[in-house]
Image (tube, rainbow, N blue to C red):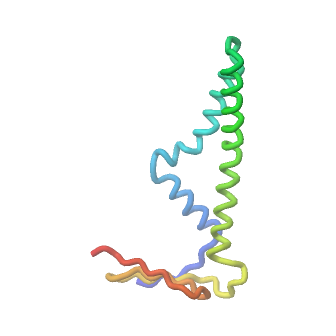
């Protein structure tokens, strides 16, 4: 079977979304740092907390706030960067070919010098 297709940035993003939904840990991982931020700030600003606990929970809450804002931005940037590396704007041929038979899976991007061959288990 031979597939000829053009991969767009929207398709690339959809593939990353499917990858993220594979396990429960990946699905819930996006909510981890915001929850940690809220809990740390609730501990830091409670009325009967000592100065050491305040400083530790405020510092950890600030770091988790940076992570909860920075990781989605970083993920978005990396998806675009990965797409640009695989499919640069200077390409004249936009199609990609995947050939699947009983012995191998052959992926071919026409203007790249390499071919990716992945053996299939029998």
Image quadrant in which the C terminus is located: bottom left
**Residue, far top:** 48
Taking the spot 70% from the left edge, 12% from the top edge, the residue there is: 47
Q: Quadrant of residue 7 in the image?
A: bottom right
* Count of numbered tags: 0
Q: Position of residue 108 (x, y in %)?
A: 52, 84
In the picture, the quarter occupied by the N terminus is bottom left
Instruction: Name the residue located 72 percent from the left edge and 79 percent from the top edge.
Output: 89
Q: Residue at x 69, y 16 (%)?
A: 46
Residue 97 % position (x, y): 52, 83
Q: Is residue 44 above or below residue 29?
A: above
Is 56 drawn above or below residue 33 in the view shown? above
Is residue 49 found left or right of 17 in the rendered image? right
- Judging depth in this view, the residue of 117 and 3 nearest the camera is 117
Task: Tell me if residue 71 comes above or below residue 51 in the rendering.
Answer: below
Which of the 4 quarters of the picture holds residue 51?
top right
Q: Is residue 58 above or below residue 87?
A: above
The percent position of residue 6, horizontal first and vertical second, equals 59, 78
Residue 5 position, x and y percent, is: 55, 79
Residue 31 or 61: which is nearer the viewer? 61
Q: Residue furthest left?
A: 122
Residue projecting furthest to the front: 52
> Which residue is located at x 59 percent, y 44 percent?
30
């Amino acid at each position: 079977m031979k597939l000829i297709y053009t991969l767009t940035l929207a398709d690339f993003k959809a593939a990353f979304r499917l990858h993220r939904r594979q396990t429960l840990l990946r699905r819930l991982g996006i909510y981890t740092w915001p929850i940690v931020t809220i809990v740390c700030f609730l501990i830091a600003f409670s009325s009967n907390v000592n100065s050491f606990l305040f400083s530790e929970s405020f510092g950890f809450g600030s770091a988790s706030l940076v992570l909860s804002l920075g990781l989605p931005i970083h993920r978005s940037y990396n998806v675009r960067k990965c797409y640009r590396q695989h499919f640069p704007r200077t390409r004249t041929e936009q199609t990609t070919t995947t050939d699947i038979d009983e012995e191998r899976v052959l992926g071919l991007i026409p203007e790249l010098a390499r071919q990716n061959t992945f053996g299939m288990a029998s």
